[in-house]
Image: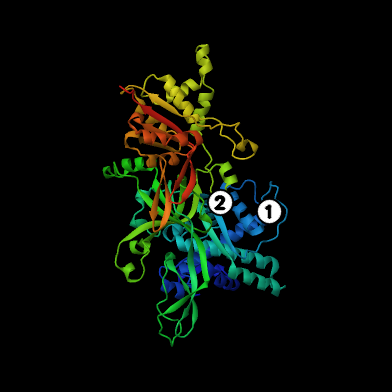
Amino acid sequence: MSFDNSPSTALAAQLSDIQKADLDRIWPNHSPEPDDACSANQQKEILDGNTYQHVARLHSFLIHTAAETAERGGAEDDPAHKKVVEDILSVIFFGTSKRKGTNNMVPARLRLTERRHVVFFPYKCFHDALRDFEEKNRRNLQQPSYASFLYHFPDKALAALGSAMALSMATLWRKKYISSLNNNIEQQQLLIKALEQCTFVVRFLDADRISSIGDIKTSLNEKLVSVKAYVIKAKPKRLRVTRADFRCNRCGEQFAFQLMNGKYNIPTRCIASSCRSKTFALLRSTAKYVGFQELKLQELPDDKVVATSTSSSSDAGRSPRQIEVEVTDDLVDTCATGDIVKVVGIVKSISTALAAGRTGRQALETSTYKLYIQANSITNTTSSESDRANNKKRKNSSAKKISFSASQLEDIRKIAHADHRIGSMKMRQSFPFDLLVHSLCPSIVGHELVKAGLLLILLGGTSPPTSGLDAHNCSTIRSNSHILIVGDPGMGKSCMLLAISQIPSRSVYVGGNTSSTTGLTCSLSKEGGEVAIEAGALILADQGVCCIDEFDKMAKANQDGLLEAMEQQQISIAKAGVVASLPARCSIVAAANPKHG
C-alpha cells in the first residue's frame, strides 16, 4: 500500500508504525470497488492521502469515545447524539452497553471480530458527535468535514469509516492484551488473523437531506443521496458473482479476477509475463457470491406537489418519476411491493447496453447511460412492530415513531383544556369530536354526518392481533371500514375525497372512469425472463385510505376486483406461475352520482 506524504496529510502522523501496519492488513477488505476490471486487479490496495487523513481522524474519534465509555460508562449529562454513538460502539467492541444507569454494566470482554459486521449509525447523531469531539479538542477545524467528504466521495468515506472501526478494534485489543512488556505471540497472531478477515460495513440511517427523485440528475452522480418513495416493483432476489478464479488455457496459470457491476467479463490477458493467451476457463468452485435484488421506486404524491410549486411550471402534469435501486447482502428482502421506504445510497451510472445484459462489442455500441441508486441503507416506514416480529427478513426495517413539535404540542394542550363548558349539554358531550368534524374540509359547509363518517374512516378501529391464539379464530374482524358517498353533482363529494386523501401518511386518489382492475390491484411484468409484481392503488394505500371518485362510471368487472380487498384486506394473484397474496389493509372511500342524476 502506498501513502501520499504531502503536507495535507500531516494528521496521518497520529497513527503509529504499528497502527500503519495494521491498516495495511485492514484496507484491502474495505477498499471501495474500482471503476473498471483492470483497476480491480491492479490498484485494489492503493490508499490516497485524503482518505488516509480521514481514517486517522475517525480512528481518533472512535478510540476516544469507546475508551471513555469503557472506563466511566458515559456521563448522564452527555448530549443525546453522543449517547447513541457510545451505545453503538459499546455493543460492537464490548458486546453490551456499558452506560451508567443501565442494566448492562457487567464488565464485558473485548470482542475481536473475524467476519463481516454491519454497523448502523444514525446520520445526524454520528456527525454531531464527531463535530463536538473535534471542536472540543480543537482538531481538524480547518479541514473539510467528514460529512462533506461523505457526500462528495461516499465510496471512499464509507471505506475510511469501516477501516477506522477495524483499526480502533485492533488498538483496543493491543492495549489490553499486547503490551511492550508482555508481547503475547498467541494474541498477536489472533489479532493479525482477525484483521485480515474482518470487514466493517457502515450504513447510515435517516440522512438529513432528502432529495426528490426528479432532482437526481447527472450532477449527483457518485454522490450520497436520500430519497423517500413507493416501492412499485421488487424483483426476485438473485446471487451475483463478485470474484472468481480463471485458469489460462495455454500455460495453466490460475489467478483471481473481479467481476464489475455483476456483469460477466473474462480477463483480457494472462498474468504470466511470458504468456499472451486470451482464452481462459472459469473455475466455478472458486466463485464468491453476494445476495442481490433490484427495486423500482416511484416518487410520492407529496414530492410531486412540491416539485410543481418550487421548480418550474413544466413539471405540472408530469407522470410520477421512477428510479431503480440495487440492494445487496442484508438489505435484500427488507421491503416489499407497496411499501414506503427511505433509501440512503450512492447515485451510480451504467451503460444501457450493459444494463440490458449485453457483453463484448455489443456493450460498446451505445454511449447512453442511465442513473440508479446503490443502496447503503433502507428504512421501511410501512412495517409495524408486529410485522417485524413475525417477519425476520424485515429485521432492518423500522416504523417511524410519531413525533410532535413544541408548537403542535401547545396547540393540542389548548384544545384539550379549551373552555367548552359555556355551550349546551349536547355541545359539551360532543367535544372534541364535533370540532374535528367541522375542521375536516371546512370549505364545504354542512354535511356534518358525511364528514363524521369520513373522520371515523380515518381513525379506524382496533387492529386484529397478528400472533397468538386470537389470530386463528373468528373473534376479531377487520379494523378498516368502507364508505360510499352518493349525491348529486356539485355537492362537494370530490372536494371531501381530496381533503381526506391529504391527511393520512399513505393515501391514493384515483378516478373510477380511468381505472382498471390491474391498476387497482396488481399486475405482472416480465423483464429479462423474470416475472415481477407491480403494485396497484389498493396495495400502495396499505394501512391508509384509497379514494375512488366517479365510482358509478367504473365498469362492473373493475368493481368486482375490490371485493377481496374490502373483505379479506389482501390481494391474491395466481398468474404466470406466481401465486401470492399482497396486503391491502386500507379503507376504501368512494363517491358516486345517482343512477339518473
Compare residues 114 and 471 and report the one nearer the observer. 471
For this orientation, the residue located farthest to the left is 314
For this orientation, the residue located farthest to the top is 424
Q: Which residue is found at the position 34% from the left and 63% from the top?
A: 353
Residue 23 found in image quarter: bottom right
| First of labels 1, 2 by sequence position | 1
Q: Which quadrant of the figure contains the C terminus? A: top left
On the image, the x and y values in percent for residue 133 come to: 55, 55
Left or right, 592 with reference to 104: left
| For residue 32, above or below residue 441 | below
Mark 1 secondary-structure assignment: helix
On the image, the x and y values in percent for residue 1 come to: 50, 75
| Residue that badge 1 annotates | 72
| Residue that badge 2 annotates | 393
Compare residues 227 and 93 and report the one nearer the observer. 227
| For residue 28, above or below residue 580 | below
Q: Would residue 224 be visible to someone looking at this image? A: no
Badge 1 amino acid: Arg
Badge 2 amino acid: Lys
User: Counting other residues with Cα less than 10 Å from the Cα at mark 1, is it few (<14), some (14-19), or many (20 or more)?
Assistant: few
Mark 2 secondary-structure assignment: helix
Left or right, 54 with reference to 69: left
On the image, the x and y values in percent for residue 484 come to: 41, 26
For the residues carrying marks 1 and 2, which lies nearer the camera in this image?
2
Res. 280 mark: none
Compare residues 216 and 163 and report the one nearer the observer. 216
